[in-house]
């Protein structure tokens, strides 16, 4: 018996992600990489100094399983200041190894075999495999281009007695849209009388342009049955640190901690220490993030204004969608391969975020968490197509 003949994959349709493929292709071709979502500029030097000091001064052993108390207190203060919501650092906040681990823990803890989970299509690529591994079944509501607004009638039609969890994400990757207060209200009206939890992925919470972003933290009813996920990777330009956190009522937190303690037990202690000290020293550190990224968004949009790409609205996140239908009839995966080869710019095809991408949708995603020079160089290349 060989391993391959006896091995039945639990995730047969999952391969190497497009992010890994496009980044590798960009490196191979020497292309400008606007595909994967990470900054090409350094984080705040004071944060790096704090992390070095934390290592040198001996913060190198396991932290408490739930996260360093000083960091959980700092997170509670951040939520109180930003959302006017009081949460308990003791039993409602858990520090995790990135938002990814938090999402995984929550799904593993709450979804039983045969439970249904509703997500909005396109969706971040981690959600479905996590639900599948937990034995759950994903049901998807399509967000239709170019507005990508949730259709609450379609959502209500998917609700059954088996629906256990709804997964939402605002500001939204990949579309760059932000939900409105009335969306949360529609969600609440649809689930209020049912035994359903909400997992709200708010990793881009501080990157929104225009109106202030809505959050489950601000909805007094939904927050009582929701888990809200955030990522310091996004808020402090530290995607490689993989430090995130999840906020949920004590009963839900107790369940997800049962998973967290066996998945990672704790997150790198010196990084937690550094983030806690940074938040204490600079409580408003994330306040300027929206204007910082808005400028980058505008630099990219202005530089592409005369190109043959059509720019879709971008209300939040650091992703800009481009419709390329005036340039090519290729499907979006083939177009991204062509683009990296011909224009020297790596992008992400939006169809990879869908279970069933709409026919003839010709949309790619660019990450603008880059130096302005990088954005201008990329836009110059794209404008020549
Ligand atoms: C919508 C969304 N959720 C979660 C994550 C994962 O965050 P982390 O790197 O903190 O695990 C990402 C990262 O790109 C994301 O875009």
Image: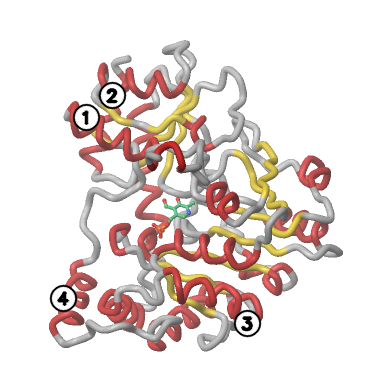
At mark 2, the secondary structure is helix
Q: Earlier in the sequence, mark 2 or mark 4?
A: 4
Q: Earlier in the sequence, mark 2 or mark 3?
A: 3
Q: Position of residue 273 (x, y in %)?
A: 29, 81
Of residue 308 and residue 103, the one placed in the foreground of this image is 103
Disc 1 marks which residue?
Answer: 31
* Gap between marks 3 and 4 measured at Cα: 34 Å
In the rendered image, the quadrant that contains the N terminus is top left
Left or right, 10 with reference to 24: right
Q: At numbered mark 3, what does the secondary structure look like: helix, strand or loop? A: helix
Q: Nearer the viewer, residue 63 or 122?
A: 63
Whole-Å distance between the Cαs marked 2 and 3? 48 Å
Which tag, 1 or 3, sits closer to the chain's start?
A: 1
Apparent side of residue 269 relative to residue 231 in the rendered image (left or right): left
Q: Give the left or right position of residue 354, taking residue 22 as reference.
A: right
Callouts 1 and 4 close, C-beta under 8 Å = no
Q: Which residue is mark 3?
A: 250
Query: Which numbered disc flags the more N-terminal residue, 1 or 4?
Result: 1
Percent coordinates x, y for residue 258 in the rendering:
54, 76
* Residues at discs 2 and 1 in contact (Cβ within 8 Å): yes
| In the image, residue 298 above or below residue 247 | above
User: Does the residue at mark 3 contact the one at mark 4 (Cβ under 8 Å)?
Assistant: no
* Residue to which mark 2 is pinned: 340
Residue at image location 35% in from the left, 61% down from the top: 233
Asked if labels 3 and 1 touch by Cβ distance under 8 angstroms, the answer is no
Point out the quarter of the image occupied by ligand 1.
bottom left
Q: Is residue 298 visible?
A: no
Q: Which mark is residue 52?
A: 4
């Amino acid at each position: 018996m060989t391993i391959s003949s006896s091995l039945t994959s639990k995730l047969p349709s999952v391969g190497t992600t497009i992010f890994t493929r496009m980044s590798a292709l960009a490196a191979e071709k020497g292309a400008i990489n606007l595909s994967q979502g990470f900054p090409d500029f350094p984080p705040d030097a004071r944060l790096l100094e704090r992390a070095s000091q934390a290592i040198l001064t001996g913060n190198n052993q396991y932290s408490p399983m739930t996260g360093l108390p000083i960091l959980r207190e700092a997170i509670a203060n951040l939520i109180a200041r930003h959302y006017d919501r009081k949460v308990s650092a003791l039993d409602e906040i858990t520090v995790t190894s990135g938002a990814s681990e938090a999402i995984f823990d929550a799904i593993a803890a709450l979804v039983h075999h045969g439970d249904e989970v509703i997500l909005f299509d396109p969706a971040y690529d981690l959600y479905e495999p996590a639900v599948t591994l937990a034995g759950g079944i994903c049901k998807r509501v399509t967000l239709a281009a170019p507005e990508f607004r949730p259709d609450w009638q379609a959502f209500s039609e998917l609700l059954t007695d088996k629906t256990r969890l709804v997964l939402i994400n605002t500001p939204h990757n990949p579309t760059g849209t932000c939900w409105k207060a009335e969306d949360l209200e529609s969600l609440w009206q649809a689930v209020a009388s049912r035994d359903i939890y909400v997992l709200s992925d708010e990793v881009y919470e501080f990157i929104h342009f225009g109106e202030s972003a809505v959050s489950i933290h601000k909805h007094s009813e939904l927050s009582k049955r929701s888990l809200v996920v955030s990522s310091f990777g996004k808020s402090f330009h530290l995607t490689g640190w993989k430090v995130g956190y999840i906020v949920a009522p004590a009963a839900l937190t107790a369940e997800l901690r049962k998973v967290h303690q066996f998945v990672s037990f704790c997150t790198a202690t010196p990084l937690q220490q550094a983030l806690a000290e940074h938040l204490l020293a600079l409580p408003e550190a994330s306040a300027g993030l929206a204007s910082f990224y808005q400028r980058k968004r505008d630099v990219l949009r202005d530089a592409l204004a005369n190109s043959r790409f059509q720019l879709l609205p971008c209300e939040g996140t650091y992703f800009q969608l481009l419709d390329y239908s005036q340039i090519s009839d290729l499907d979006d995966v083939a177009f991204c391969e062509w683009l990296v080869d011909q224009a020297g710019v790596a992008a992400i095809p939006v169809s990879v975020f869908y279970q069933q991408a709409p026919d003839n949708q010709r949309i790619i995603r660019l990450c603008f968490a880059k130096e302005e020079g990088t954005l201008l160089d990329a836009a110059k290349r794209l404008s020549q197509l």
